[in-house]
Amino acid sequence: MRIANTIQDSIVDGPGLRFVVFTQGCEFCCEGCHNQETWDVDGGVDMPVGEIIAQMLGNPLTDGLTMSGGEPFLQAVDCAKIAKTARENGLNVWVYTGYTFEELMAEPGFRELLCLTDVLIDGPFRLAERSLNIKWRGSQNQRVIDVKKSLAAGGAVLLEV
């Protein structure tokens, strides 16, 4: 799997202490992105999925997994493996994506990762809508979505934050 970095004990990428995987490669290239170094699909480093999982499970204080980027859905199969292991070990899964929930629903190749996600922060970062006063998002257009409720309802259900 191609990643930019991993971080233990993040408190800014979702609730609690989180293990964060920053995937490498992004087709959105949003103006004002704070992770521009993750855009190049050839950047970052190759890391076996098993090694990422071992890092994630290595800290008993971890509350959840967050996948960010780059764009996690460009590596949906590998991200789904990590998310599945996280869920099997009692961790909640948050995913940040430039795609909208509706776009993800329309793409069969994204379905497994989407179904393993508890909370989805969707939509591209928009510099004109940037705000430091909203929780878990960078711009006003992005939504914090309860994925389980959304899948059951057939449309995006926002999580109360």
Image (cartoon, grey):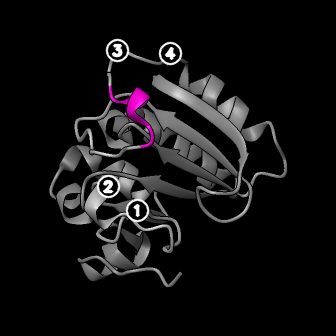
Gap in angstroms between the C-alphas marked 4 and 1: 25 Å
Q: Earlier in the sequence, mark 3 or mark 2?
A: 3
Gap in angstroms between the C-alphas marked 2 and 4: 24 Å
Residue at image coords 51%, 65% = 136
Q: Which residue is mark 2?
A: 125
For the residues labelled 4 and 3, say whether their Cβ atoms are less than 8 Å apart: no
Give, as a three-letter code, the residue at label 1: Ile
Give, as a three-letter code, the residue at label 2: Phe
Gap in angstroms between the C-alphas marked 1 and 2: 10 Å
How dense is the environment of label 1, judged by Cα within 10 Å: few (below 14), some, or many (20 and up)? many
Q: Is residue 148 above or below residue 61?
A: below
Q: Which residue is mark 1?
A: 121
Gap in angstroms between the C-alphas marked 1 and 3: 25 Å
Give the structural element (helix, strand or loop) at label 3. Answer: loop
Q: Which residue is mark 4?
A: 45
Q: Which residue is mark 3?
A: 42
In the rendered image, residue 120, in percent from the top left (x then y), is placed at 41, 62
From where the camera sits, is residue 126 visible? no
How dense is the environment of label 3, judged by Cα within 10 Å: few (below 14), some, or many (20 and up)? few
Give the structural element (helix, strand or loop) at label 1. Answer: strand
Gap in angstroms between the C-alphas marked 3 and 2: 22 Å
Residue at image coords 40%, 79% = 149
